[in-house]
């Protein structure tokens, strides 16, 4: 069963379990605002469209609501607790899984998926998923292998190691260790499944993309440090 609570996990709890759902991280009005913005961005020609999904990257470029989310002090507290101070934002994007989309491949996230020799014994990075629509087994909610964040190799899909579905409501925050094997499920509903993805790495890990140029998203030193624009 997936670990859930109405607050952030402790470091000991998360290092042991590698997953957590923070119930009610955002309220209904914030979810509605982000959902409206997401619908507009995902419908634009500039979005990355594939048969299975639609993606929009670098959301901090697309309005104050996303900048406020990036700078949410609760996220800072979460990453300070789990990754240490001055954790870097590696990804802030939208992901919409289309109706009828096939299941994603099992994978781990950056930086583990880029390593020739996996570094063991450290958390290194978090993958956070903020649903803007319901995450259910029918809508293709994220599936993950519990405990796989400590194995570093893809675990066999056996009855003793069955995947767990991260069922969550809009506004909940799903938090996974980046080394957790996971995938998107099959969306069997008539509507799309939409979420904001937020990835963070320890301060010394080089982000996948270069730091952005100055802009509205870099109005505070904390934001510049978070985006890798300035050293702490």
Image (cartoon, grey):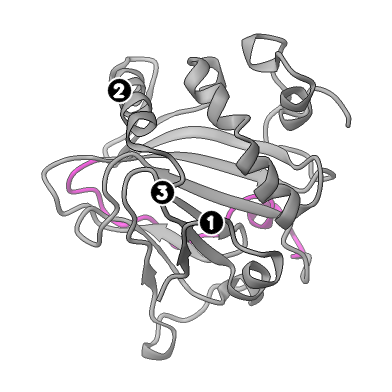
Tell me which numbered mark, 1 or 2, is placed earlier along the sequence: 1
Q: Residues within 10 Å of mark 3 (few under 14, many from 20)?
A: some
The answer to whether one can see residue 152 in this image is: no
Q: Which residues are magenta?
A: 98-118
Q: Residue furthest top?
A: 215
Tell me if label 1 and label 2 are in contact, CB under 8 Å: no
Q: Residue visible at 50% across and 75% down?
A: 146
Above or below residue 96? Residue 221 is above
Residue 117 occupies quadrant: bottom right
Above or below residue 51? Residue 80 is below
Residue 31 occupies quadrant: top left
The residues tagged by marks 3 and 1 sit, at their Cα atoms, a distance apart of 9 Å
Query: Which residue, given by chain and number where applicable, does mark 3 sit on?
Result: 24
- In this view, the residue in front, 34 or 199, is 34
Classify residue 137 as left or right of residue 31.
left
> Element at badge 1?
loop
Query: Which residue, given by chain and number where applicable, does mark 2 sit on?
Result: 36
Q: Position of residue 2 (x, y in %)?
A: 43, 70
State yes or no: residue 28 in magenta: no
> Element at badge 2?
helix
State yes or no: residue 117 in magenta: yes
Query: Which residue, given by chain and number where applicable, does mark 1 sit on?
Result: 7
Q: Position of residue 204 (x, y in %)?
A: 85, 44
Q: Position of residue 100 (x, y in %)?
A: 17, 48
Q: Residue furthest left?
A: 190
> Element at badge 3?
loop
Q: Nearer the viewer, mark 1 or mark 2?
A: 1
């Amino acid at each position: 069963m997936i670990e859930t609570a109405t607050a952030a996990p402790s470091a000991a709890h998360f290092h042991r379990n590698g997953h957590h759902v923070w119930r009610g991280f955002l309220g209904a009005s914030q979810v509605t605002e982000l959902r409206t913005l997401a619908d507009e961005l995902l419908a634009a020609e500039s979005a990355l469209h594939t048969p299975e999904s639609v993606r929009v990257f670098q959301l901090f470029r697309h309005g104050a609501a996303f900048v406020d989310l990036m700078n949410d002090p609760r996220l800072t507290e979460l990453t300070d607790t789990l990754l240490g101070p001055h954790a870097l934002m590696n990804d802030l994007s939208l992901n919409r899984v289309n109706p009828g989309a096939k299941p994603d491949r099992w994978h781990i996230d950056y930086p583990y998926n880029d390593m020739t020799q996996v570094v063991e014994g450290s958390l290194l990075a978090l993958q956070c998923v903020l649903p803007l629509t319901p995450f259910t087994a029918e809508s293709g909610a994220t599936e993950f292998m519990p405990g796989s964040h400590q194995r570093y190799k893809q675990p066999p899909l056996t009855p003793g190691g069955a995947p767990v579905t991260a069922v969550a409501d809009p506004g909940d925050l799903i938090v996974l260790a980046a080394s957790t094997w996971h995938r998107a499920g099959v969306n069997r509903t008539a509507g799309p499944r939409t979420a904001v993805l937020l990835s963070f790495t320890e301060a010394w890990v080089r982000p996948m993309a270069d730091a952005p140029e100055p802009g509205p998203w870099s109005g505070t030193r904390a934001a510049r440090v978070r985006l890798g624009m300035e050293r702490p």
